[in-house]
């Protein structure tokens, strides 16, 4: 069995922003935001959330694990679809409350459960004259 890492509680502002210790700041719900991008192209693939266990599993296995808020359970991305996200690099933002995962996607190369490459396949359009806000398909 692989030993999962543990995370110390966040330190001072200086330690968070300038230190060398990874102390992710989980929100009151126990989650941290994670953005997955294609490691080769930089294309934004998806936004998800991680709890301490999914973050630890991601680091230990080199494959992306998330916390499914809708299902209330751990989610090994691609376990059923084959779209495993292999971690190339993980970055943390300045105050350690958001993660950037640079990944390579297995299977058909898609990432979204709709079968698309990215979850961000629609743009938001606003018509100031009518006040209408609509969704518009976007090319990847």
Image: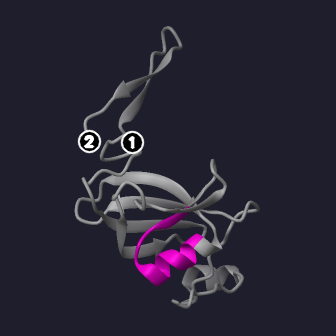
Task: Kindly identify the residue that appears in the image at 30 percent across and 47 percent down.
Answer: 117
Q: Position of residue 41 (x, y in %)?
A: 23, 59
| In this view, 134 is above or below 83 | above
**Which quadrant holds residue 38?**
bottom left
Residue extent of the magenta highlight:
54-66
Q: Position of residue 32 (x, y in %)?
A: 61, 64
Q: Position of residue 76 (x, y in %)?
A: 48, 64
| In this view, 111 is above or below 4 | above
Crowding at mark 2 (Cα within 10 Å: few <14, some 14-19, many 20+)? few
Task: Kindly identify the residue that appears in the image at 29 percent across and 59 percent down.
Answer: 42
Q: Which residue is mark 1?
A: 120
Q: Earlier in the sequence, mark 1 or mark 2?
A: 1
Q: Secondary structure at mark 2?
A: loop
Q: Residue furthest right?
A: 28
Is the Cβ of the residue at disc 1 closer than 8 Å to that at disc 2? no
**Which quadrant holds residue 43?**
bottom left
Magenta region includes residue 55: yes
Q: Position of residue 39 (x, y in %)?
A: 28, 66
Foreground pick, 126 / 71? 71
Residue 95 visible in rendering? no
Q: Which residue is mark 2?
A: 140
- Left or right: 131 as drawn, with respect to 25: left
Magenta region includes residue 78: no
Disc marking residue 30? none
Task: Kindly identify the residue that appears in the image at 55 percent across and 84 percent down.
Answer: 18
| In this view, 108 is above or below 20 | above
* Quarter of the figure that contains the C terminus: top left
Q: Secondary structure at mark 1?
A: loop
Q: Main secondary structure of the magenta part?
A: helix
Tally the numbered discs: 2
Q: CA distance from mark 1 to mark 2?
A: 8 Å
């Amino acid at each position: 069995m692989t030993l999962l890492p543990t995370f110390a509680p966040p330190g001072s502002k200086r330690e968070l922003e300038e230190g060398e210790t990874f102390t992710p700041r989980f929100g009151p719900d126990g989650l941290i935001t994670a953005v997955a991008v294609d490691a080769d192209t930089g294309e934004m693939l998806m936004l998800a959330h991680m709890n301490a266990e999914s973050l630890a599993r991601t680091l230990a296995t080199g494959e992306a694990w998330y916390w499914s808020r809708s299902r209330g359970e751990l989610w090994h991305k691609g376990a059923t679809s084959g779209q495993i996200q292999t971690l190339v690099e993980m970055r943390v933002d300045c105050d350690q409350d958001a993660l950037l995962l640079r990944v390579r996607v297995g299977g058909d190369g898609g990432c979204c459960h709709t079968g698309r490459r990215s979850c961000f396949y629609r743009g938001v359009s606003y018509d100031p004259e009518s006040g209408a806000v609509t969704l518009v398909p976007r090319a990847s």
